[in-house]
Amino acid sequence: MVYHASTVWLSLALSLFASPALARSVGPRDPVPEGYHAAPYYPAPYGGWLDSWKDAYAKAQDLVSQMTLAEKTNITSGVGIFMGPCVGNTGSADRLGFPQLCLQDSALGVSSADNVTAFPAGITTGATWDKALMYARGVAMGKEFRGKGANVHLGPSVGPLGRKPLGGRNWEGFGSDPVLQAKAAAQHIRGVQEQGVIATIKHYIGNEQEMFRMYNPFQPGYSANIDDRTLHEVYLWPFAEAVHAGVGAVMTAYNAVNGSACSQHSNLINGILKDELGFQGMVMSDWLSHISGVDSALAGLDMNMPGDTNIPLFGFSLWQYEMTRSVLNGSVPVDRLNDMATRVVAAWYKMKQDKDHPRPNFSSNTRDRDGLLYPAAVFSPTGQVNWFVNVQDDHNLVARQVAQDAITLLKNNGSFLPLSGSSKLTVFGTDAQVNPAGPNACLNRACNTGTLGMGWGSGVADYPYFDDPISAIRKRIPDVKFHNTDNFPLIIDTPSPDDIAMVFISSDAGENSFTVENNHGDRDSDKLAAWHGGDRLVQKAAEKFKNVVVVVHTVGPLILESWIDHPSVKAVLFAHLPGQEAGESLTNILFGDVSPSGHLPYSITKAATDFPDSIANLKGFALGQVQDTYSEGLYIDYRSLHQQSIQPRFAFGHGLSYTTFTLTNATIQPITTPLSFTPPPRAPKPSPPILPTTLPAASEAYTPEGFTKIWRYLYPWLPKHEADAAHTIGVEGKEKYTYPAGYATEQRPGPAAGGGEGGNPALWDVAWEVALTVTNAGERFAGKASVQAYLQFPEGGVYETPAVQLRDFEKTRELGPGESERVTVRLTRKDVSVWDVELQNWVVPGAEEVGGGRYTVWIGEASDKLFLACYTDTGECEDGLEPPV
Ligand SMILES: *[C@@H]1O[C@H](CO)[C@@H](O)[C@H](O)[C@H]1NC(C)=O
Ligand SMILES: *[C@@H]1O[C@H](CO)[C@@H](O)[C@H](O)[C@H]1NC(C)=O
Ligand SMILES: *[C@@H]1O[C@H](CO)[C@@H](O)[C@H](O)[C@H]1NC(C)=O
Ligand SMILES: *[C@@H]1O[C@H](CO)[C@@H](O)[C@H](O)[C@H]1NC(C)=O
Ligand SMILES: *[C@@H]1O[C@H](CO)[C@@H](O)[C@H](O)[C@H]1NC(C)=O
Ligand SMILES: CC(=O)N[C@H]1CO[C@H](CO)[C@@H](O)[C@@H]1O
Ligand SMILES: CC(=O)N[C@H]1CO[C@H](CO)[C@@H](O)[C@@H]1O
């Protein structure tokens, strides 16, 4: 979440409510539905016990051991919103050479900055189904964040996961499936962090709609009520994979889970993230979601962003000077603050930011060269804030490749596409041309004017330029007719039978901080219809023209029924959200330079009601806490449709090519088998070395003499008398903080499901490998094939599982006619496991100990094109089968 400086004064109107007394402790909660509970989990596990982080922790401990109390509290909190160049700026420990950290949005590029690349959005990247491109986009983005001097990249986003088609921020992530999200996120994280930038997996967890997500003085954020198995097998899955990939930071979500706010949920942070998943980096709050001081620290939060309470700009924080006081008075144990600070510094060392990491050379607050250094201060010094460093390099190439390889051909009746250069084309729709006021005319892209390249909110970046579809089409067909309107013209030349209408339509969504055309972040107003009457525009064009091609820029699925079967509608392309490279990426496909190879990262149903109410609808206003209960369990997207035997219009994973592929000669190879029912026991959790826990001297908290404070900037210091008073309480130990129920101080041994980054290391043992030959069976076009592997669990058994679940995918290189490639997909122990809530562990339902059973690995180009299967019991593969669903 990001406020622009121009909204500062708006926020001031909230001044009536500005008081630290608004803090909400973990204490009494609003009632959640029967059976959902947020069990306490204390204490916060120390970081530093895993080999992969050992060196970083050794250096971090050395540095933190030299820090004063005020230095430690300084680096674990922001210094206030708009108090520096980045959307988040921490305090520093300058004396020891530890700088302020710059935390910057977004998941698709450096936000609020000039001379950067506006990459295709996450949903577009997911639609490529191409791990190499997911990685390459991460590499390019990491270079840009580093080049601008950011330490922390606030991406990737895998939460929302895309449970609700109407959800506002689904497009920031990679698609409505845990494995697609997980593999894309892992590639992205690897790419970004290899450039020395800390990636942040967000938003942890259950942020599946925008409306009512935030705590405010009148109402708590909604509660996502999720049962343990669903959490593990669906929503946590991509977070676990991100931790396994070594992600340096996690951001908590605005909403609550089971009634307890994510920023202070001890079970989610201490229990699941830090103990079970063994997360070694730092956990930050989402912007202005910090609602308790001591309690959030005890629950495992390591960094408060941007430093303020949830009402910003008054110079109030629940940490900084209050954290200093809480440690001095004995409420927050010294070892907790040490661990918080060490986690922050360890992430910094892990990405080698101690070696020549650039300082921020841009400002999120202005595009001018000079500006206020601390815009939120009442009196701020000014100086140079923008150096206009161009970090784009040749990243337009990877951006275009992603945009192009994501384009998903849903329908192509009679091989209508590709077009020839002599096609007689008439283009309709405002979505074909860039916003006439400029691509960045709307603050945070909070409008849907012109070609839709990204959604709105904090998850955006400024376009350096915009290659729009109409300009790219004119390069091919200079005299193309263009009706830049969403109303079909009343008078139009009668088209001849070979005239082609190309209609551009869109659907937008974004963050709840902005409302666009009555959509409050989520698509609550337009729902699953095209905006601006786009469906009507297609119908009118189809009445008039014999040949219609529809191009859709969209944040997610739409209902296409009003025109999809019209005989004039020959071809439909989903171009998703292409970012700056919307034009040539599209014409390369339209005119057949390359075959389309994108595949749907979600299902497109015939009716919104094809999903149960808990998925299909947003939760509306309620008195007290809005309750969003995941009563559908594991059954979202295609899992839900299979369960109900409902045929979608276009299935998850669907995508056509100009050529055809055959998948043959499959083999299945056991690797680490037989599998025991539960993973081999984890290694005991070593006790990491810890720093001394003696109460610091009060003097470590004194404001230095002669220091001139900037009014409303957040500092870690206390006036001498306050520091002394807090210290006295801490030494006497008579006044006790009222700790939350279940509070404990003894480090736990760590759960059986843990043991490494992401969980028990054995979960990543490859159990089976399936290899197959993909051949381009066409005669004219080259193309890339998507190979998708879906797992069917053994029949019977005590664990009910979805009919099939995506477990791995690969994309071939471009294969010429007749060319082949051997492709391998893999199943890990985790892939063939389910989460047993009694055992609190991953179990293998087909293990021999429990009677064995056949797993079927279905391979195909889409979830409804599964004709090839391999069996784990016989080790055989069969072709030409009826699909299982
Ligand atoms: C939420 O409540 C359900 C039902 O009791 C439980 O299975 C799950 O573990 C709880 N989740 C968290 C994160 O506490
Ligand atoms: C805290 O950080 C701010 C901003 O970098 C800095 O001015 C101040 O000196 C720091 N305080 C300590 C104790 O290092
Ligand atoms: C210590 O200070 C914190 C922060 O102001 C406060 O919440 C807590 O109640 C205090 N604890 C004691 C024992 O005074
Ligand atoms: C596909 O095109 C053929 C003619 O080429 C037509 O008969 C048929 O109705 C079309 N199908 C759809 C679904 O539009
Ligand atoms: C089939 O796969 C096997 C095993 O990888 C390989 O040796 C063989 O050459 C393949 N045959 C064809 C026709 O692709
Ligand atoms: C190369 C480039 O795009 N430079 C731009 C960097 O940003 C400044 C300010 O917006 C522009 O004037 C430059 O053209
Ligand atoms: C504040 C700061 O470090 N600015 C630097 C940003 O990058 C440019 C170009 O590398 C430098 O000249 C600035 O000093």
Image (cartoon, grey):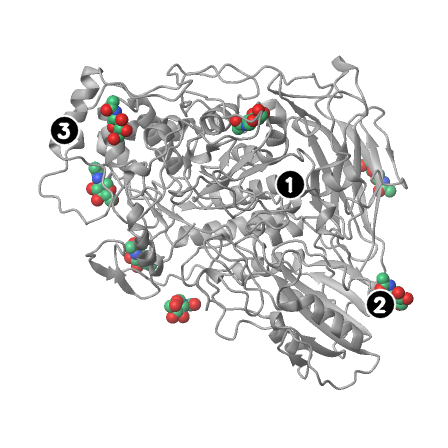
Mark 2 secondary-structure assignment: loop
Residue 567 tag number? 2
Q: Is residue 757 visible?
A: no
Three-letter residue code for mark 2:
Pro
Nearer the observer: mark 1 or 3; the answer is 1
Is the residue marked 3 within 8 Å of ligand 2, measured from its CB? no
Q: Nearer the viewer, residue 38 or 881?
A: 38
Nearer the observer: mark 2 or 1; the answer is 1
Give the CA separation, mark 2 to mark 1: 35 Å
User: Measured from the top left, where is residue 637 in percent x and y?
Assistant: 69, 43
Q: Residue at x 49, y 29 (%)?
A: 268
Q: Where does label 1 land, which residue?
A: 614
Vertical arrangement, residue 202 with respect to residue 466, above or below: above
Q: Where does label 3 land, which residue?
A: 699
Q: Nearer the viewer, residue 545 or 342?
A: 545
Three-letter residue code for mark 3:
Ser
Mark 3 secondary-structure assignment: helix
Q: On the rendered structure, is 856 left or right of 91?
A: right
Q: On the rendered structure, is 497 left or right of 614?
A: right
Q: Splitting the image into four quadrants, where does ligand 4 fall?
A: bottom right
Q: Is residue 434 visible?
A: yes
